[in-house]
């Protein structure tokens, strides 16, 4: 299992400088944004797509730092009813093509969220089946998503690329049973970019979620969350307080180890190994209480103690 980093927090540095810094930390892999919310500071699609010379230069730069690309990131809303949906669809399809050309096996993103009906112009996150128009809207959204993702899954399969969907509230797929439903409706190219940070504050047991998803996990984000009960006991965890008003929020994204202890992260790594995951743990820094570099460095330090570097030997004690 590799320690990786989503390089977005280092977007103000050149790719070469960012890779040099990460290699010095002992990082094994990078996840590169190429559109959508992650931006494309280190991998602008128009510069690299269908350009063999640019792609060769990228491979050489990666080789210079002994790093590999674990995934291309293009998180956006391809089910948005407006122009954003069209742009997100283009980003996602081109990211899949580019991943194929770069021999990268995974693209990460969101499921997207449709409007609540064919005449609506704004996405609508449904969280309850009553009043019944909400249940009807949810059914409509799944029809839209199934149609879109069935076609997208075929596109991904044509290019031999997996799509890792990050289960994220305010998206249609925000928890493991929804992830399983979308995968069942499409094909095995559709799976999870398993980010525990969005599950913690929903009250989901992340190791049980790993066991539930099993081989549907295509990629993993290493990001923590801390729930602050002094706030959540009063207003719950569906918190719209601005992320910069940290003291008033029910929960915050935290650097690895600052929401859950080292023992928990070792258990999570072990459970991922149990279901056969042997890819990257891609650190995503979104902790507003520390700098990007310090957050990344502390996360790498903890994960280095948590990951296994060797394959299991024979269980001689069981013979």
Image (cartoon, rainbow, N blue to C red):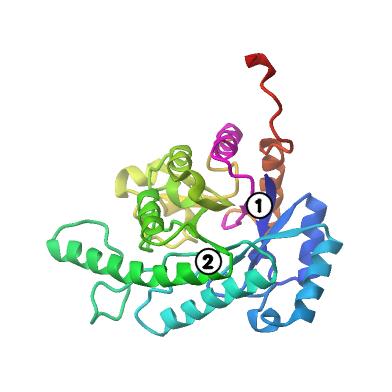
* Camera-side residue of 52 and 70: 52
Which circle's residue, 1 or 2, is located before the other in the chain? Answer: 2
Which residue matches tag 1? 295
Does 268 sit left or right of 8 as displayed? left
Which residue matches tag 2? 157
Q: Quadrant of the C terminus?
A: top right
Report x, y in % for residue 18. Answer: 76, 65
Secondary-structure class at tag 2: helix
Res 286 quadrant in image: bottom right
Q: Give the alpha-carbon distance from disc 1 to disc 2, as whole Å.
A: 36 Å
Report x, y in % for residue 131. Answer: 13, 61
* Camera-side residue of 279 and 296: 279
Magenta segment boundaries in residue numbering: 262-288
At 69% from the left and 17% from the top, the residue drawn is: 316
Count of marks overlaid on the render = 2
* Camera-side residue of 228 and 224: 224
* Camera-side residue of 225 and 307: 307
- Of circles 1 and 2, the one toward us is 2
At 76% from the left and 79% from the top, the residue drawn is: 52
Does 266 sit left or right of 78 as displayed? right
At 42% from the left and 39% from the top, the residue drawn is: 205
Does 50 sit left or right of 178 as displayed? right
Res. 265 visible in picture: yes
Does 315 sit left or right of 243 as displayed? right
Q: Most extreme residue toward the right, as rendered?
A: 64
Report x, y in % for residue 3. Answer: 69, 49
Is 118 rendered above or below residue 270? below
């Amino acid at each position: 299992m590799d320690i990786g980093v989503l390089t977005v927090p280092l977007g103000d540095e050149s790719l070469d400088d960012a890779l040099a810094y990460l290699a010095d930390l002992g990082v094994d892999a990078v996840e590169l944004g190429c559109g959508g919310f992650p931006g494309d500071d280190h991998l602008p699609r128009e510069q690299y797509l269908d350009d063999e010379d640019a792609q060769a230069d990228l491979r050489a730069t990666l080789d210079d730092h002994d790093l590999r690309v674990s995934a291309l990131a293009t998180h956006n809303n391809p089910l948005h009813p407006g122009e954003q949906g069209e742009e997100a669809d283009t980003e996602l399809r081109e990211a899949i093509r580019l991943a194929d050309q770069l021999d990268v096996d995974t693209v990460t993103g969101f499921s997207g969220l449709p409007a609540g009906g064919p005449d609506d112009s704004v996405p609508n996150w449904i969280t309850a089946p009553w009043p019944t128009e909400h249940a009807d809207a949810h059914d409509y959204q799944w029809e839209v998503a199934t149609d879109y993702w069935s076609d997208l899954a075929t596109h991904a399969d044509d290019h031999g690329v997996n799509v890792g969907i990050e289960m994220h509230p305010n998206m249609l797929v925000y928890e493991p049973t929804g992830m399983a439903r979308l995968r069942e409706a499409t094909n095995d190219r559709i799976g999870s970019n398993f980010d525990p940070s969005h599950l913690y504050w929903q009250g989901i047991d992340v190791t049980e979620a790993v066991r539930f998803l099993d081989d549907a996990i295509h990629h993993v984000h290493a990001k923590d969350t801390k729930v602050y009960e002094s706030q959540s006991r009063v207003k719950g965890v569906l918190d719209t307080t601005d992320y910069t008003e940290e003291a008033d929020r029910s929960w915050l994204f935290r650097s690895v180890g600052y929401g859950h202890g080292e023992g928990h992260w070792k258990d999570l790594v072990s459970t991922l190994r149990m279901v056969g995951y042997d890819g990257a743990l891609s650190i995503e820094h979104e902790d507003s209480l520390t700098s990007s570099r310090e957050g990344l460095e502390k996360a790498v330090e903890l994960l280095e103690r948590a990951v296994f570097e060797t394959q299991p030997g024979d269980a001689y004690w069981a013979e």
